[in-house]
Image (cartoon, helix red, strand yellow):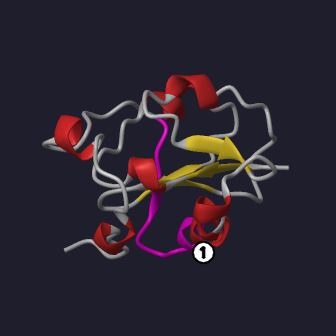
Amino acid sequence: MTYVVTEACIQCKYTDCVTVCPMDCFMEGPNFLVINPDECIDCSICVPECPLGAIVSDHEIPDDQRHFIDINRQLSQHASWKRISRVQPPMPNHEHWATIKDKLSLLETEST
């Protein structure tokens, strides 16, 4: 089992979760975080740190978010995504984006 960052994180990118991760397995992209599933030790410490509930177990992930298992795996290996272990401010307008559903089309994989 591993933990997965889901759609709720897109355009918000709260980083409280990264400071508690004992393995530093979070990777940061332009508007989203992912967990490297090969490094995650399934401790679940990050789960309660996310104010949006965007981090879930791959065994408990809702069907409409299952594609984020592959997205986390792929983007954690992406050359331009860097390891993150310190809190950073959330994205501009994060309060607004936290209320929006269906944000996959906004996911940025490359820095602009």
How far across and how far down the image is residue 51, in percent?
Answer: 43, 27
Lateral position of residue 105 relative to residue 58, left or right: left
How far across and how far down the image is residue 42, in percent?
Answer: 80, 39
Q: Is residue 42 above or below residue 26?
A: above
Q: Residues within 10 Å of mark 1 (few under 14, many from 20)?
A: few
Lateral position of residue 109 relative to residue 27, left or right: left
Q: Which amino acid type is shown beneath numbered disc 1?
A: Gln
Q: Looking at the image, how many numbered discs can be counted on the residues?
A: 1
Q: Is residue 85 above or below residue 104?
A: above
Nearer to us in this view, 71 or 8: 8
How far across and how far down the image is residue 47, in percent?
Answer: 62, 31
Residue at the right extreme, as displayed: 1
- What residue is rendered at 52% in x and 31% in y? 17
- What residue is rendered at 69% in x and 51% in y? 61
How far across and how far down the image is residue 26, in percent?
Answer: 55, 48
Nearer to us in this view, 74 or 101: 101
Q: Quadrant of the C terminus?
A: bottom left
Q: Is residue 101 above or below residue 55?
A: below
Nearer to us in this view, 101 or 39: 101
Lateral position of residue 79 relative to residue 72, left or right: left
Residue occupied by mark 1: 74
Please report the bounds of the magenta region as a residue range.
74-85
Residue 2 on the magenta segment:
no
